[in-house]
């Protein structure tokens, strides 16, 4: 691995940092909104699956009693 002086390293960091493209406020808002919506949908889905499995287990346990 090639050794780089601290000054050259900082120059390379500056060059790479200049290539960063930050999302706009609108893009960030839309992405956050989509995350919230998908999280809510997944929560509802898993709540439904959990409720269904719970009902099935309770019915099976009722048969054993």
Image: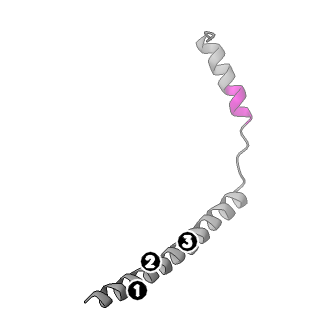
Q: Secondary structure at mark 1?
A: helix
Q: Quadrant of the C terminus?
A: bottom left
- Residue visible at 63% across and 67% down in the picture: 33
Marks 2 and 1 sit apart, C-alpha to C-alpha, by 9 Å
| Mark 3 lies on residue | 42
- Residue visible at 74% across and 35% down in the picture: 19
Marks 2 and 3 sit apart, C-alpha to C-alpha, by 12 Å
Quarter of the figure with residue 11: top right
Relative to residue 12, is residue 45 depicted above or below?
A: below
Mark 2 residue crowding within 10 angstroms, few (<14) / some (14–19) / many (20+): few
Relative to residue 25, is residue 49 depicted above or below?
A: below
**In the depicted view, which residue is nearer to us: 46 or 56?**
56
| Mark 2 lies on residue | 50
- Residue visible at 50% across and 74% down in the picture: 46
Q: Secondary structure at mark 3?
A: helix
| Mark 1 lies on residue | 55
> What residue range appears in magenta?
14-19
- Residue visible at 37% across and 88% down in the picture: 59
**In the depicted view, which residue is nearer to us: 44 or 53?**
53
What label sits on residue 13 in the rendered view? none
Q: Is residue 65 left or right of residue 23?
A: left
Looking at the image, how many numbered discs can be counted on the residues? 3
- Number of the front mark, 1 or 3: 1
- Number of the front mark, 2 or 1: 1
Marks 1 and 3 sit apart, C-alpha to C-alpha, by 20 Å
Q: Is residue 52 left or right of residue 57?
A: right
Question: Seen from this angle, which residue lies furthest left?
Answer: 65
Q: Name which of mark 2 and mark 1 comes first in the sequence.
A: 2
**In the depicted view, which residue is nearer to us: 45 or 9?**
45
Relative to residue 20, is residue 49 depicted above or below?
A: below
Mark 1 residue crowding within 10 angstroms, few (<14) / some (14–19) / many (20+): few
**Residue 27 is covered by the magenta coloring:** no
């Amino acid at each position: 691995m090639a050794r780089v002086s601290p000054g050259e390293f900082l120059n390379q960091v500056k060059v790479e940092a200049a290539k960063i493209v930050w999302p706009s406020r609108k893009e960030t808002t839309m992405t956050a909104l989509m995350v919230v919506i998908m999280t809510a949908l997944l929560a509802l889905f898993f709540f439904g699956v959990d409720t269904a499995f719970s009902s099935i287990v309770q019915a099976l346990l009722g048969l054993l009693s």
